[in-house]
Amino acid sequence: MKVVKLVVFVVFILLNFICIPSFVKAATMEELPPYITVKGVDTSKYEIAKTISDEKVIIDIIEKDGDLYYSWSFDKDKIGSEIDLNFELNFESPKKQEIDALAENPDKTYLSFTHHGNLPSEATINVYVGNKYSNGEKLYLYYYNEEKNTIEYVDKGLEVKDGYVTFKINHCSDYFLTGAVVNNAEGNPKNMNTIIGMLAVIVIGLVGATLFFKR
């Protein structure tokens, strides 16, 4: 009887050492969907941190011995069971010459994504620009359409906070940030100066017409 009890005790101990650790490993975030495959990032220069919450999937690219360089964020319920993507972002564009020919703004910050094409869902990009812009500055985001060789307006009023700026995209290609409007860009919003100028012309026209008909 004692032998049987001893055997049961030994089996119990072995199960604790073998089965339980396997269960815990399988239950970690890295082993549960969505599965994230990060390509393109030079791991000799950057560390990659993945965070999965109930709502978000966040991939942080962090300079070794430094701070967060840039990050990607997706809504968890919109990306499916996995993300297999080249997450590399460069701040020098291979299309620099073409972009500069269309947009003469001197303060451009190039954002060249290695992945080109649509994303699995809309992504929120958080990128460090504190080396070029001051906190509180408002920036414009533009996209270079290489098929049409045009600059297209994407967003405005992107405020620099703690050295970072945040924007949303659903397609990867070559973008740039700038502190001024690119006048010949497609889809530019009407700025206040244009609106005020148009109103002034209308008012002057109405005053002139009123004076004319009073004669």
Image (spheres, rainbow, N blue to C red):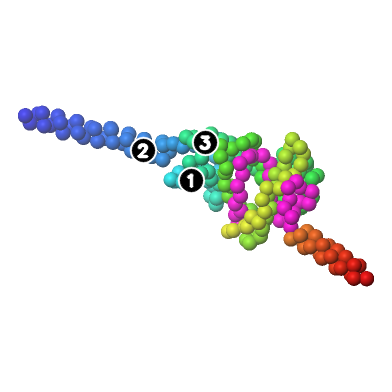
Q: Residue 120 appears at what percent x and percent y?
A: 56, 37
- Residue under the image location 63 percent in, 39 percent down: 171
Q: CA distance from mark 3 to mark 1?
A: 13 Å
The single residue placed furthest to the right in the displayed view is 215
In the rendered view, would you say 171 is above or below 2?
Answer: below
Q: Can you say which quadrant of the picture contains the C terminus? A: bottom right
* Residue 168 is a magenta residue: yes
Distance of mark 2 from mark 1, alpha carbons? 18 Å
Q: Is residue 43 left or right of residue 136?
A: left
Question: Going by the image, does 26 lie left or right of 202?
Answer: left
Look at discs 2 and 1 and give the one toward the viewer: 1
Task: Determine the residue positioned at 61% across, 50% down.
Answer: 167
Instruction: Note whether residue 5 is visible.
Output: yes
Q: Residue furthest front?
A: 214
Mark 2 or mark 1: whose residue is earlier in sequence: 2
Hey, what amino acid is under mark 3?
Ile
**Residue 17 or 151: which is nearer the viewer?**
151
Please indicate whether residue 18 sits to the left or right of residue 78 in the image.
left
Amino acid type at circle 2 is: Ala
* Residue drawn at x 74%, y 35% as measured from the top left: 147
Label disc, if present, on residue 83 of the rendered structure:
3
Relative to 164, residue 92 above or below: above
Say if the magenta span includes residue 36: no
Q: At numbered mark 1, what does the secondary structure look like: helix, strand or loop?
A: strand
Q: Which residue is mark 2?
A: 27
Q: Going by the image, does 206 lie left or right of 55?
A: right
Q: Is residue 96 above or below residue 12?
A: below
Label 1 belongs to which residue?
56
What's drawn in magenta, residue-wise? 163-191
